[in-house]
Image (spheres, grey):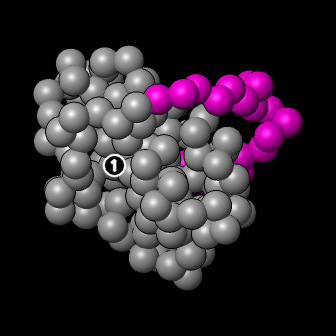
């Protein structure tokens, strides 16, 4: 069967209270052309996903994120669902208005690329 993608309009009214957490850079956390290649247990370390995602959002900038759409998903392996939830909460806190998320958080890389190019006439600013 085919896959499913849900578009979720993100609402600050439905979000938990925002929290600002002080953090430090994490050694070796440098994405390459195919993302960050680390074992799952590294991603599960405290603040690892949060630091990485916030670094992406800081790079894109608040103006570009305000009201933007993004694509969020992973390969569905262990810790994918938890990471997707963290990314969605952080996206909302950073002003993202809409996220396209694969069923159970699963989106293959070619599908994510297609969604970024095709949804809303190519309006999503990127994907995580």
Q: 58 or 128, which lies in front?
A: 58
Q: 49 or 123, which lies in front?
A: 49
State how many labels appear. 1
Looking at the image, residue 7 lies above or below residue 111: above
Q: 114 or 16, which lies in front?
A: 16
Q: Which quarter of the picture shows residue 44? A: top left
Left or right: 66, with 90 as reference point: right
Residue bearing the label numbered 1: 107
Looking at the image, residue 75 lies above or below residue 71: above
Picture coordinates of residue 124, whole percent (x, y): 53, 68
Looking at the image, residue 118 lies above or below residue 26: below
Picture coordinates of residue 1, whole percent (x, y): 31, 48
Span of residues in magenta: 5-23
Point 67% across, 42% down: residue: 93
Q: Secondary structure at mark 1?
A: loop
Point 56% across, 75% down: residue: 123
Mark yes or no: residue 1 visible. Answer: yes
Point 41% across, 36% down: residue: 51
Q: 93 or 110, which lies in front?
A: 93
What crowding class fits label 1: few (fewer than 14 Cα within 10 Å), some (14-19), or many (20 or more)? many
Picture coordinates of residue 94, whole percent (x, y): 64, 49
Mark yes or no: residue 81 visible. Answer: no
Looking at the image, residue 112 lies above or below residue 74: below
Picture coordinates of residue 50, whole percent (x, y): 45, 33
């Amino acid at each position: 069967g085919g896959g499913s993608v849900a578009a979720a309009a993100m609402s600050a009214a439905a979000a938990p209270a925002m929290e600002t957490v002080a953090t430090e850079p994490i050694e070796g956390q440098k994405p390459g052309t195919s993302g960050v290649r680390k074992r799952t247990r590294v991603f599960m370390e405290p603040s690892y996903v949060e630091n990485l995602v916030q670094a992406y959002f800081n790079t894109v900038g608040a103006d570009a994120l305000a009201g933007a759409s993004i694509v969020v998903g992973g390969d569905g392996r262990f810790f994918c669902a938890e990471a997707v939830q963290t990314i969605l909460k952080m996206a909302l806190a950073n002003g993202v208005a809409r996220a396209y998320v694969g069923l159970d958080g699963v989106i293959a890389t070619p599908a994510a690329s297609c969604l970024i190019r095709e949804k809303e006439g190519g309006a999503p600013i990127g994907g995580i």
